[in-house]
Amino acid sequence: MDKESALELASKYISYLKENNYDIVKAILFGSFAKGDFDNDSDIDIAVIFKNLDDKFKTQVKLFMLTPKFDTRIEPHPIDINDFNHNNQFAHEIIKYGIEIT
């Protein structure tokens, strides 16, 4: 899989989530596909930024359960917008190297 294919898959996954009433502010492809240092075994890391994320663990489980509909390499990472905006190290990495999914 190439970078464009990973981005297209990520976009379809995020569109599906939005169509199913997930309150997503934005989504960002990050990790090896965004940086361009991926291989055949690389995960498709997606930061899924929510307006209000009450239970991160429960949300992550729900998001993972939907990935087989698209590709099992998709690895969603739910983040509350407030945590994302406080410029922690994880958010900094995503902002620096990530590609926003439209």
Image: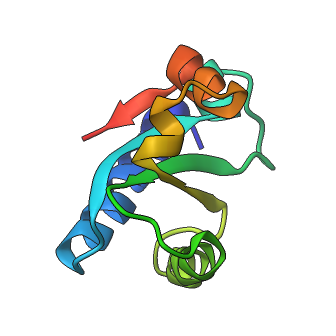
Residue 70 x, y percent position in the rendering? 47, 71
Q: Residue at x 54, y 48 (%)?
A: 46
| Quadrant in the picture for the C terminus | top left
Question: Does 57 sit above or below residue 12?
Answer: below
User: Where is 18 relative to 20, above or below?
Assistant: above
Q: Which x, y percent locates residue 91? A: 59, 31
- Which residue occupies the extreme top position in the image? 96
Q: Quadrant of the N terminus?
A: top right
**Left or right side of 13 for 46:** right
Q: Residue at x 66, y 75 (%)?
A: 57
Q: Nearer the viewer, residue 59 or 101?
A: 59
Name which quarter of the figure residue 78 lies in.
bottom right
Residue 20 falls in image quadrant: bottom left
- Left or right of 71, for residue 43: right
State the colouring used for the structure image: rainbow
**Residue 51 or residue 9, whichever sits in front:** 51
Which x, y percent locates residue 17? 32, 71
Give the number of callouts.
0
Question: Which residue is depicted at the point 36% across and 63% down?
Answer: 52
> What residue is at 61 percent from the left and 21 percent from the top?
92
